Amino acid sequence: MASSSASWKDQDPYSAPGPLGARYDDHPLHLDIQLVVPGIRPKSFYRAANTQVNIKSDPFSMKCVVEIVKIDKKKTPPEKSIIDRRFYQIQRFPAEIEDITWKLKKDCCHLTIKKKVAQSWENQMSQFGMT
């Protein structure tokens, strides 16, 4: 039994809360999903990104864990600690998918799901939802 003082490392990542919001954009060849997670900082010329994205998927479903991390470079070796963790899943896509890619933007993780066959998922998404 986990106590409230347990570290992020001890907790099941799939039990983490979801993003603050999700926005879907359906296109014939792909589906764009924007996950709103305050604190995400993308890589820039001056600073490294502070976010790790881990995706597990098969042709019909997906699980995504977004972790905002802080690295303490004063320690040897540098120590990484998780500041926030968010979990998002799609239990069943309306049809088969080929690939998932991601990109970080400020306070947002942008997922692109490549569809195996070009078609609209708008009806299924609005009727059944995607979560």
Image: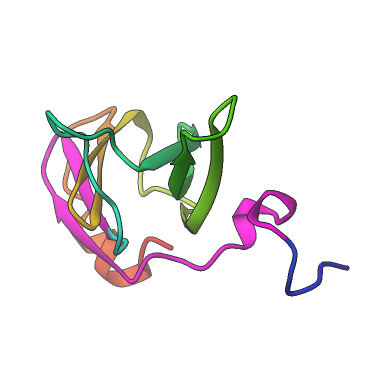
Q: Nearer the viewer, residue 67 or 59?
A: 67
Q: Which region is colored magenta?
A: 7-35
Residue 19: image location, x then y, percent? 38, 65
Residue at figure coordinates x 57%, y 63% from the top left: 16
Quadrant of the image containing the C terminus: bottom left
Q: Residue at x 54, y 39 (%)?
A: 80
Q: Is residue 80 left or right of residue 53?
A: right
Compared with 130, 43 (above or below) is above
Residue 32, magenta (yes or no): yes
Q: Position of residue 81 (x, y in %)?
A: 55, 47
Residue at the (32%, 61%) spot, across then down: 37
2 and 15: which is toward the camera = 2
The image quadrant that residue 96 belongs to is top left
**Quadrant placement of the N terminus:** bottom right
At 15% from the left and 34% from the top, the residue drawn is 44
Is residue 5 left or right of 23 when viewed as pictured?
right
Observer-nearest residue: 67 or 70?
70
Q: Please, is residue 105 above or below residue 20 in the view?
A: above
- Report if residue 61 is visible in the image: no
Residue 36 percent coordinates (x, y): 27, 62
Q: Can the viewer see residue 66 in this picture?
A: yes
